[in-house]
Amino acid sequence: MTTPVRAAQYGFAERWLPRLVLAPSFLLTLVFLYGFIAWNGYLSFTTSRMLPNTEWAGLAQYATLFENERWWVAVRNLVVFAVLFIGGAMGIGVVLAVLLDQKIRLEGAIRTIYLYPMALSFIVTGTAWKWILNPGLGIEKLMHDWGFTNFTFDWLVNSDMSIYTVVLAGLWQSSGFVMALFLAGLRGVDDSIIKAAQIDGATLPRIYWKIILPALRPVVFSTLMVLSHIAIKSFDLIMALTGGGPGYSSDVPATFMYSMAFTRGQMGVGAASAMMMLMAVAAVVVPYLYSELRKDGNNG
């Protein structure tokens, strides 16, 4: 008599215990992530300024956003940063991964050196590069002390070049991460493919370009997704390095949203800009998720 009862109890626990364990985190995520996203979306359609209110304003905040010159500067900077950051990190990471894949000496030490910046927060990276690029403290002063008095490197305080200092710092931090992802993918490629291609007379660069890298398409897409996410939500690196300046020349949507919502008393405009950022992330993530789910469905 006890065996069926115990079996039923075990089956009940096996079926419901995982759900009970996951329920609190699921509820917290539902409320504090998706709930606040919905609340932010609602605020973008209200007249909220210093404090949130429920007075409906329709698309007025979005109209104000699109008429704001600073917003378009932020969008342009995001495009520049995203293109150079993603393209540069992918290019540098792939080259480093291919070089390390040649089984060179001290590979472990070199890999650690390139990966180390990823262990730092963007705040630390931004602060360090702010010292390095400061004309009165960093590279420019060092060159002047060495006797090169005509040398100038004032990107940090030059409104036309300030966004490129953010690109430099971002590449320094993220290229090693890309290298690690591609190196892991390269180590999973069957050596017989490379040997067969070499027998056919293909050079090593051509083998990597035409055979191996196309086989790493999942790694490429995953890396592209991660870097795109970092680029769109970039905030701490810019705040630590340039503060969005000089003026607002290095603003991006994330810093624009923070400034509007928390320092300039335009919460509705800030909420509208946050929703535009959400749409940008969705434009990257949703097609990727759709293709992956479709692929899994076809395999099933």
Image (spheres, rainbow, N blue to C red):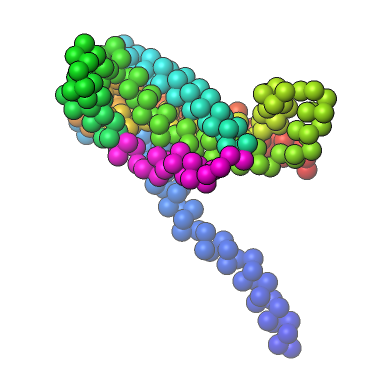
| Residue 110 counted in the magenta span | yes
Q: Position of residue 37 (x, y in %)?
A: 41, 37
Query: What stretch of residues is rendered in magenta?
Result: 103-125
Taking the view exactly as shown, the residue that stands out farthest to the front is 147
Quarter of the image with the C terminus is top right
Prevalent SS, magenta region: helix
| Res 223 → quadrant | top right
The answer to whether 250 appears left or right of 92 in the picture is left
Pick the quarter of the image with the N terminus: bottom right
Residue 58 drawn above or below residue 295 = above
Residue 289: x and y, percent?
61, 34
Question: Which residue of the protein is positioned furthest toward the bottom in this rendering?
Answer: 1
Q: Nearer the viewer, residue 20 or 181?
A: 181
Task: Identify the residue shown where x is 56% and y is 42%.
Answer: 105
Q: Can residue 39 be seen in the rendering of this structure? A: yes
193 horizontally vs 83: left or right? right
